[in-house]
Image (spheres, helix red, strand yellow):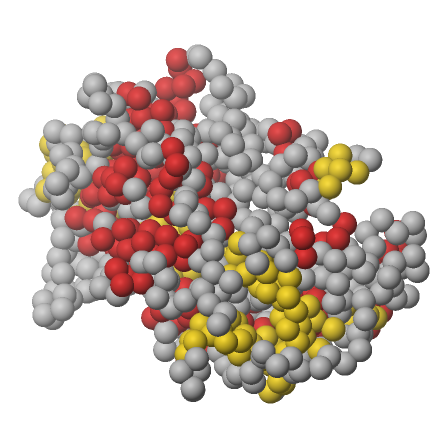
Amino acid sequence: MSSAPEQEAVAEEPLAPPADVRPGTPTPLGARYRTGPDGTAGTNFALWAGGAEAVELCLFDDEGHQTRHPLTELTHEIWHGFLPGVGPGQRYGYRVHGRWDPWTGARWNPAKLLLDPYARAVDGDFGTHTETGPTGPALPAQLYGHVRDWPEQHIADTVRDDRDSAPYVPKGVVVGDAEDGQDEWRDDRRPKTPWPDSVLYELHVRGFTMRHPGIPERLRGTYAGLAHPAALDHLVRLGVTAVELLPVHQFAHEDHLVRRGLRNYWGYNSIGYFAPHAGYAATGTRGQQVGEFKRMVRALHDAGIEVILDVVYNHTAEAGERGPTLSLRGIDNRGYYRLQGDPRRYADYTGCGNTLHVVQPHVLRLITDSLRYWVTEMGVDGFRFDLAAALARSFHDVDMLSPFLAVIAQDPVLRRVKLIAEPWDVGAGGYQVGAFPPLWTEWNDRYRDTVRDFWRGAAPDVRDLGYRLSGSSDLYAWGGRRPYASVNFITAHDGFTLRDLVSYEHKRNEANGEDNRDGTHDNRSWNCGAEGETADPEVTALRRRQLRNLLATLLLSTGVPMLVAGDEMGRTQHGNNNAYCQDNAIGWVDWSLLADPHWRALAEHTARLIALRRAHPVLRRRAFFSGRPQHRGGLRDLAWFGPDGTEMTERDWYAPGATLAMYLSGNDIPQRDARGVRVTDDSFLVVLHAGAGPRGVVLPGPPWAGGYELLVDTSDDTPAGEVPESGPVDAPVYGPVDGEPVALPVPRLVPAGAELTVPGRTVLLFRAVPE
């Protein structure tokens, strides 16, 4: 089938070359403002569209009027042309002509205006325009290349819709190389924090700033808001070294959300891999968002904080065969997407309807060009790749020698930045934790599950916990990888917040409009005796202790810790473990929590642990433990003890138990500084007791220590001190002050060999005092 019979087809006769379009060049791809050979200023447009028969460039004025300019130059499947007089701020899109034959995967439809995959700025927002149908609001039917409401729904995607989509879609924007902020950008200095010294902080640009009283209202929810001193102050005082931003590439809102009166909040629905999401810009969307983003990066760098982007190159917002036609589908559907044996259907390793065909050279080029752009021109310091296993698939199977991983490994720009894999996708064989090659770090969900199970009392023994605390050598000690290959996390954006993890055993996702069917059922959570919010003082005190336990475990483990924004102050989503569509108080950080002395004390606890980690190299090792002395007369670099103060045997690892002590020898670190001098440090003993009741624990005697100083005791529920009248946001009372480490609680000296009564569900951290 072709077009709907009652609709007028778009003419597809050969297009004559216009007098106002010069040949231009096929590189670089996208729209680049420049001066031509004859000194004429204008913009070069270049679009890869491999199987297309013709390409029209459409320019739009401020009133939305359109002029069409056929591109007749074709070089290596790239359509290109130079338009004199077209400069920064110009809005544009493409119409691509070709066959309409979905049965063979061909879905060209020139009635649909398409976003340039290389557009560096986008004006407008997919989902802003809606239509009202019999069931309420929906995305306009004109956005779809097929007739969405065709009576025979099983073949609806094969019937072409010839209505013009231009009035309903955002437009690409020409951006000049000297846009606002470029001069200021040139002297930016990257922090270049080594992986072992890194503490990641996952945050949402909009959600982190929307409720912050110290940020001017007009800047909340924007890049400029995150760059504001009030936002930076919290990050600096907390001590994190990098922010990991949820997706900031231009993204679209799904029809099913629009129909429920919701929006895509997290942003894992990308459609523009070069463009900062326009909805997060305070200064404008005609290219100003580019300069605003750069100034945000500069401000974070000046504060010593790196910027890591969560990127979604595994799929796009065009979804499956019944999704809208916004960009790649209309440019060359078969060239950009993985199709099934039935080419009408899409291979879906992502759960989002489509998967980019990364094996194709032009798709691989799109991704790597995008990555290099964000590093070299936008200043970012690394990337976290959503569903990275989908990118590592060659034709079907995940392949660690895939073109994508091979290109990254040899790229002189990309191999030098931080690369984090979410090492799974939803396809067969997609779970690849521990399998990514050297150069990569990985989100370690084994760490998440093990720590959750231990503190909720579900772990029958401590075998797995030992591996997770010491860097997960069972997963990563191969091929020259280091402990920092493991990004340790207990919570992330997708799941319960830390507070909800100890407050709910069942998800509460009704606000998402899916009858609570969405979101994982496997939360490994424990509500501490009451489901949801409660005023019971014993339950609330236990929950706060569990939060301190989880944070202490995370920040004292070997590997790279990742916190989630707001967890350090008790943020709750009221049991929603899938708040991807909650662009409201459910998904935003609640800064008023810092007015509560108990939640402020949790922020202090977090900052103190980060300061300890920063001060002691034994807590952020660069090499895996060996369990042996590292020099003559030394101790084992890592030793494990049971509650009786003796070293654990093989049988002890398999015995039921909820108590474990880990000794880290600071005199046995296999590391030298830049001058070649051996690095030494204090030694520490970490005691973790997950049992409900108190437990007697004997502290190891000589030669391990002559005594122990208690530095951290998570059973201490003392609230924070009074808040200054100006409030906790303007004058935080947690974190390092003027660059100095936080003053730790007054240490208590305990003799070696003494038996302590450890309260139920407690972490103790001791510094070993030499004999």
Give the residue displayed 56% in from the left and 69% down from the top. Answer: 392
- Give the vertical position of 564 relative to 343 (above or below): above
Is residue 348 visible to us here? Answer: no
Front residue of 182/358: it is 182
Task: Using the rendered view, name the quadrant where residue 50 is placed.
Answer: bottom right
Q: Is residue 554 left or right of residue 707?
A: right
Give the residue displayed 50% in from the left and 56% down from the top. Answer: 249
Front residue of 118/752: it is 118
Tell me the quadrant of the picture where the N terminus can be found. bottom right
Numbered circles on residues, count: 0
Give the residue displayed 79% in from the left and 57% down from the top. Answer: 163
Give the residue displayed 56% in from the left and 85% down from the top. Answer: 23
Q: Which x, y percent locates residue 572?
A: 46, 29
- Give the vertical position of 260 relative to 268 (above or below): above
Q: Which x, y percent locates residue 41?
A: 43, 76
Q: Which x, y percent locates residue 87?
A: 46, 68
Front residue of 5/138: it is 5
Q: Is residue 665 left or right of residue 758?
A: left
Is residue 298 visible to us here? Answer: yes
Q: Is residue 192 left or right of residue 337?
A: left
Report the residue that reaches farthest toward the left: 771
Report the residue that reaches farthest toward the top: 536
- Give the vertical position of 449 relative to 291 (above or below): above
Tell me the quadrant of the picture where the C terminus can be found. top left
Task: Using the rendered view, name the quadrant where residue 531 is placed.
Answer: top right
Q: Which x, y percent locates residue 746?
A: 12, 29
- Give the vertical position of 307 relative to 600 (above or below): below
